[in-house]
Image (spheres, coloured by chain):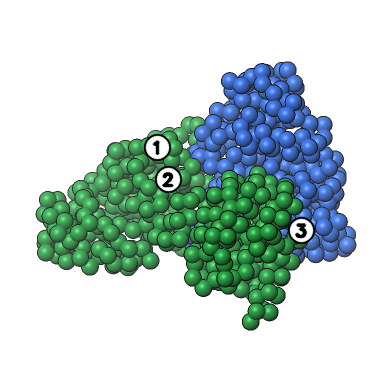
């Protein structure tokens, strides 16, 4: 779950990372009041869960209360990469002498935290890694030891910085690592950390993504994961506990596993376009598949729904009952085809067939999809 | 022969008294798995499907000489259970549990260090040596004994591909689900090394998906070390950028981790890479015929 900049900045402040004075505003009037309270000039920043908002006009400086109100009016309610801006951050503008990049992420392959520092701040670290790899200093950190202060200082010195700079920046790196560990982050990033004209250091942005699996042990982070999903169908999927990705196509997909769902998309994509990706996870019940049917069939312009299920951990015969109950209450005008295999497959076939689902028995997904394609081509 | 698991392996089931643990214990027993004990803290003395339940792993090891363990333990309990199991001297641990915090996975990996314990998962279907035993949740009727080694990030997709292979008469020596989280315990290269050394495996099938760098590391391993042929399929050719495709680790970020780039990396390393699951069968047949 990605946090908004202001939520990340709150965590930074709690852990001792210096940030400029800021407030949150949800209306132009409020932005004006907050700008006056903080003291001008300020920067008005759109709060959206995506990068590249600066280029989209979502970050602008204001020298007067009128200007702050005017900028907030333009940004609030606008859309940046399909996300509607409902809040702005009003932050004290600082004079920047130099920018740096600081990040902690996970080296998935080696299974350790990875600390990254670069003197190329304010641009994407992926871009720097491509164009100037020598400017990216990174270190895997043994998770049981944590980041040693001496190691952090050495990274900063390796980047060519000396004097007072290395202990100051190392201190921020140390605090950022603390944020990463304490809040179960997948990513904690400051881009940029700036040295101001006065010689102080401030984090001018906060990108923090929290591991969804760890939310049970962070009751102090009071945010709802659903409210930050922009797409209404994807939000509904998250609410009922399945993974739904909205796509631009005409065949609805329900799969009982992620890999199977992606493979089903690959196969359907040869002749048609998938309307969605949907993976049920390993906790199928009749109610869950009832809700899943309602969700997938909400999408406009569907030509068919293809249901691909494996009985491994999942009781697919239970799921079949939910599918049939949904179709009995809401008869479908398009073909619903299912290809259930694995434990209790015979029982599942029977329940679905009696409920009006076209059941393909005991064949590979390709063969089942061929039958669906034939059916749809005949109907043309 | 096989890798990691056979009909003699003395298996422990952790979380055996839970709903999923009970149901899966029955399937595993029916398949022929040599389950010798179960563990649920506080439930020592009970029985599940005729299997004695102990309150601790140490007891199960002492009393029943358990040597491998499969976890149906809740996510929040996995870290402590894993440490207990490693300390008790179990050599193989399969973690089926989904939604284990990634920081816990990193801590367990650090705890394993060089103790020589093999862990698989989390979020994995487990291991099956067809015709002998299975530790995990895969439906046994999709597999058959044979000489193909299978390594998969996805559970359900490994069932699909093994069923396709079985249908064509191509059975499996062992099929291993490695899990699909951002951090897993055992990666593709280490599992390939086991199959490379297994005298009863002729060819390895890799089933990958978008996200992470497992397949890229597998490609390097193939180029340097594999003498046996490798056939692969990567799921998610039309996965959109920036969306998690069900698995926490299945995400294309920028132009990183796409099915296309993984397919290219494996192809350059000398593997035959299918575009669709059923094509795996054809490529396996071709490779075996040309030996």
C-alpha distance separating marks 2 and 3: 41 Å
Does residue B260 appear anywhere in the picture? no
| As drawn, B98 above or below B281 | above
Classify 10 Å Cα crowding around label 3: few (below 14), some (14-19), many (20 and above).
some
Q: Position of residue A48 (x, y in %)?
A: 33, 58
Q: Residue at x 64, y 19 (%)?
A: B44
Please identify, in this view, whether the residue under mark 2 or under mark 1 is nearer the observer: 1
Q: CA distance from mark 3 to mark 1?
A: 45 Å
Question: Which residue lies at the image location 26% right of the left edge and 50% below the top edge?
Answer: A195
Q: Residues within 10 Å of mark 1 (few under 14, many from 20)?
A: few
SS at badge 2: strand
Q: Which mark is residue A200?
A: none
In this view of the protein, can residue A377 be seen by the observer? Answer: yes
Q: CA distance from mark 2 to mark 1?
A: 10 Å
User: Dot 3: what SS?
Assistant: loop
Residue in front for this viewpoint, A357 or B237: A357
Q: Which hue is chain A drawn in?
A: green
Q: Contact, CB < 8 Å: mark 2 with mark 1? A: yes
Q: Which comes before the other along the chain, label 2 or label 3?
A: 2
Residue B70 % position (x, y): 67, 34
Closer-to-camera residue (B245/B111): B245
Q: Do dots 3 and 1 share one subunit?
A: yes
What secondary structure is found at the residue carrying circle 1? loop
**Residue hosting label 1:** A218
| Identity of the residue drawn at 32% across and 63% down | A84
Q: Write down the quadrant of residue A94 in the picture.
A: bottom left
Q: Which mark is residue A210?
A: 2
Residue displayed at 38% across by 54% down = A228
Horizontal and vertical percent for residue B139?
A: 73, 46
């Amino acid at each position: 779950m990605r946090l908004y900049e202001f939520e990340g900045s709150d965590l930074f402040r709690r852990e001792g990372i210096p940030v400029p004075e800021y407030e949150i505003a949800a209306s132009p009037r409020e932005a004006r009041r907050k700008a006056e309270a903080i003291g001008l000039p300020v920067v008005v920043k759109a709060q959206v869960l995506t990068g590249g908002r600066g280029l989209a006009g979502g970050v602008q400086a204001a020298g007067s209360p009128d200007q702050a109100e005017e900028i907030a009016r333009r940004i609030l309610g606008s859309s940046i990469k399909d996300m509607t801006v409902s809040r702005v951050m009003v932050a004290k503008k600082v004079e920047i002498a130099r920018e740096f990049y600081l990040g902690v992420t996970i080296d998935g392959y080696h299974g350790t935290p990875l600390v990254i520092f670069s003197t190329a701040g304010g641009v994407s670290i992926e871009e720097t890694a491509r164009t100037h790899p020598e400017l990216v200093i990174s270190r895997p950190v043994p998770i049981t030891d944590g980041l040693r202060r001496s190691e952090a200082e050495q990274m900063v010195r390796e980047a060519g910085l000396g004097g007072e700079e290395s202990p100051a920046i190392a201190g921020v790196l140390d605090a950022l690592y603390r944020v990463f560990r304490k809040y179960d982050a997948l990513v904690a990033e400051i881009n940029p950390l700036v040295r101001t004209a006065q010689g102080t250091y401030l984090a001018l942005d906060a990108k923090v993504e929290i591991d969804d699996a760890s939310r049970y042990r962070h009751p102090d982070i009071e945010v709802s994961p659903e409210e930050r999903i922009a797409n209404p169908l994807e939000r509904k999927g998250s609410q009922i506990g399945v993974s739904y990705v909205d796509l631009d196509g005409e065949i609805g997909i329900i799969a009982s596993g992620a890999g199977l769902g992606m493979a089903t998309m690959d196969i359907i994509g040869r002749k048609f376009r998938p309307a969605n990706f949907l993976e049920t996870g390993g906790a199928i019940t009749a109610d869950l598949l009832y809700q899943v049917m309602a969700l997938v069939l909400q999408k406009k312009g569907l030509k068919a729904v293809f249901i691909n299920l494996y009985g491994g951990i999942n009781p697919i015969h239970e799921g079949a009952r939910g599918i049939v109950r949904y179709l009995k209450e809401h008869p479908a005008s398009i073909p619903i085809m299912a290809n259930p295999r694995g434990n209790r497959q015979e029982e599942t076939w029977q329940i679905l067939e009696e409920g009006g689902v076209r059941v393909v028995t005991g064949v590979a997904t390709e063969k089942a999809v061929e039958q669906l394609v034939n059916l749809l081509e005949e109907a043309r | 022969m096989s890798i990691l698991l056979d009909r003699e392996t003395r298996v422990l089931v952790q979380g055996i008294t839970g709903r999923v643990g009970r149901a899966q214990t029955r399937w595993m027993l029916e398949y022929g798995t040599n389950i010798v004990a179960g563990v649920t803290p506080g439930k020592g003395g009970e029985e599940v499907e005729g299997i004695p339940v102990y309150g601790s792993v140490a007891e199960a090891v002492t009393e029943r000489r358990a040597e491998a363990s499969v976890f149906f333990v809740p996510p929040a309990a996995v870290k402590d259970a894993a440490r207990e199991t490693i300390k008790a001297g179990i050599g193989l641990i399969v973690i089926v549990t989904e939604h284990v915090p990634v920081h816990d996975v990193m801590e367990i990996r650090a705890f394993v260090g060089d103790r020589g314990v093999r862990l698989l998962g989390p979020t994995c279907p487990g291991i099956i040596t067809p015709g002998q035993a299975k530790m995990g949740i895969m439906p046994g009727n999709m597999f058959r004994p044979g000489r193909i080694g299978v390594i998969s990030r996805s559970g359900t997709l490994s069932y699909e591909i093994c069923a396709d292979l079985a249908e064509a008469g191509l059975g499996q020596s062992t099929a291993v689900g490695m899990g699909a989280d951002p951090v897993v315990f055992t990666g593709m290269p280490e599992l390939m090394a086991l199959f490379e050394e297994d005298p009863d495996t002729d060819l390895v099938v890799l089933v990958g998906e978008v996200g992470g760098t497992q397949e890229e590391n597998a490609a390097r391993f193939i180029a340097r070390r594999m003498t046996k042929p490798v056939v692969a399929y990567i799921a998610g050719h039309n996965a959109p950028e920036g969306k998690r495709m069900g698995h926490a680790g299945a995400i294309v970020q920028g132009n990183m981790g796409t099915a296309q780039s993984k397919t290219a990396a494996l192809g350059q390393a000398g593997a035959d890479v299918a575009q669709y699951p059923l094509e795996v069968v054809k490529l396996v047949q071709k490779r075996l015929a040309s030996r």
